Image (cartoon, grey):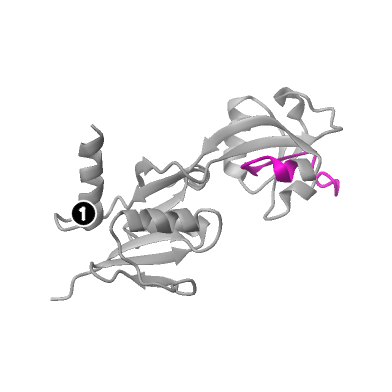
Amino acid sequence: MTIQPIRFAIQSSGRLRTDSLSFVTELGVDLPLNNNRSLVLRARTMPVEVIFLRHSDIPRYVASGDIDYAIVGDNVLYEQSSKVIKLQSLNFGHCNLVIAVPQYSLIKRISDLTDQRIATAYPRSLEKFLSDNNITASVIPIRGSVEATPQLNLADAICDLTQTGTTLRLHRLEPLQVIFSSQAVLIQSPIYLPSPLDPIAKFLQHQYVATR
């Protein structure tokens, strides 16, 4: 009888990949060595497959049941309003979604954003923040090089992720408002039902009992 492997997705490239692989190893999943180019890795001693996906695609696959477990940034879940089960925060991949403005800007408080143009790769998160604060502004969805848009006169402000603030400073931008803080989280598909033999569920249960 063939056992259906547990499918565990992590970021294919980016800031979460290395720490995600380390966490998967801590779960007891023994992955083969020299795995940098593989998109699917089969654990050597248990029915688990680690699948490398584009970060923004992960919540959709988990919500649909194509992936059982995954590690993803909380900011992506918030942006997509993903219908998944959040199991725990993982204390890595910390960052903030911030609104930032040029250092020379006359925008000094969030109310000054009224009727301004804000470029972002997180339009839903930004629109929710603006709505919650009764601010009417033009949201300009953009992918990549968000920080350059004020210099190109394409936007008056930006909304983007930042970890250390270095990129903002390089583009002579300064934070105006933190919308929310994010970190990596472990999620589970609402369709997936862990079996008593699921090694990941067993590890998480043991971890939960040990910390009580």
Residue 60 visible to an observer of this rendering: no
x, y (%) of residue 196? 14, 54
The reply, left or right, for residue 103 in relation to residue 91 is right
Residue 35 visible to an observer of this rendering: yes
Q: Quadrant of the C terminus?
A: top left
- Please tell me in which quadrant of the rendered image residue 43 appears: bottom left
Q: Is residue 170 magenta?
A: no
Disc 1 secondary structure class: loop
Q: Nearer the viewer, residue 157 or 132?
A: 157
Q: Is residue 165 magenta?
A: yes
Q: Which residues are magenta?
A: 150-168
* Residue at the (48%, 58%) spot, across then down: 18
* Residue at the (51%, 39%) spot, across then down: 182
x, y (%) of residue 32? 36, 72
The reply, left or right, for residue 42 in relation to residue 3 is right
* Residue at the (77%, 32%) spot, across then down: 115
x, y (%) of residue 189? 32, 53
Q: Check disc 1 and report the residue beneath it.
A: 194
Q: Quadrant of the N terminus?
A: bottom left
The reply, left or right, for residue 46 in relation to residue 42 is left
Q: In the image, is residue 106 above or below residue 102?
A: above
* Residue at the (24%, 39%) spot, across then down: 208
